Amino acid sequence: MPFNCRRCKLSRIRRCIVSVGGSSPAVAVFITDAPTAADERLKRMGRTPQARILSRMVAEAAEMIGIDCPAYQLIPMVFCRPSEPLADTDRAPARDEILACVPNVLEAIQAANPRQ
């Protein structure tokens, strides 16, 4: 996880770097959208309603094919919450912010060590 990343302008407005969510070691990884205010408060991905829906979908799919629910990780496309500083509202990350975070995402995937 990028503990002191300064690759993009999000580093100037972030409150924290949000960590990946889920289990380690992971059988699979899912690249998710950018962290929300809720993720930022908890400093971890996967605590939002959308993440709970994904968890249910993975569990149901595993049940349908007759396997135990696999361990997986949620890796955000950017590790800092994109927000409008004055309004403190979530926004989609800019293209340059996403591209700047690609090395961090690849590092997180490698650390998760999903099954090949």
Image (cartoon, rainbow, N blue to C red):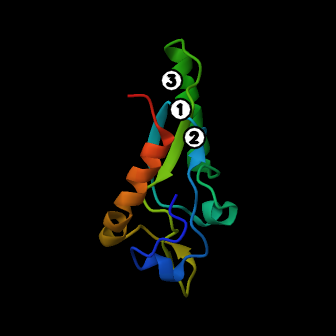
Residue located beneath label 3 in the image: 61
- For the residues labelled 3 and 1, the Cα–Cα distance comes to 6 Å
**Type of amino acid under label 1:** Met
Kindly indicate whether the residue at mark 1 contacts the one at mark 3 (C-beta within 8 angstroms). Answer: yes
- In the image, is residue 27 above or below residue 20? above
Disc on res. 39: none
Give residue 18's position: percent from left, percent from top.
58, 61
Quadrant in the picture for residue 60: top right
Quadrant in the picture for residue 103: bottom left
Kindly indicate whether the residue at mark 2 contacts the one at mark 3 (C-beta within 8 angstroms). Answer: no
Q: Residue furthest bottom?
A: 86
Q: Residue at x 68, y 65 (%)?
A: 41
**Type of amino acid under label 3:** Ala
Q: Residue at x 61, y 42 (%)?
A: 52
Q: How many marks?
A: 3
Disc on res. 57: 1
Q: Secondary structure at mark 3?
A: helix
Q: Residue at x 38, y 51 (%)?
A: 106
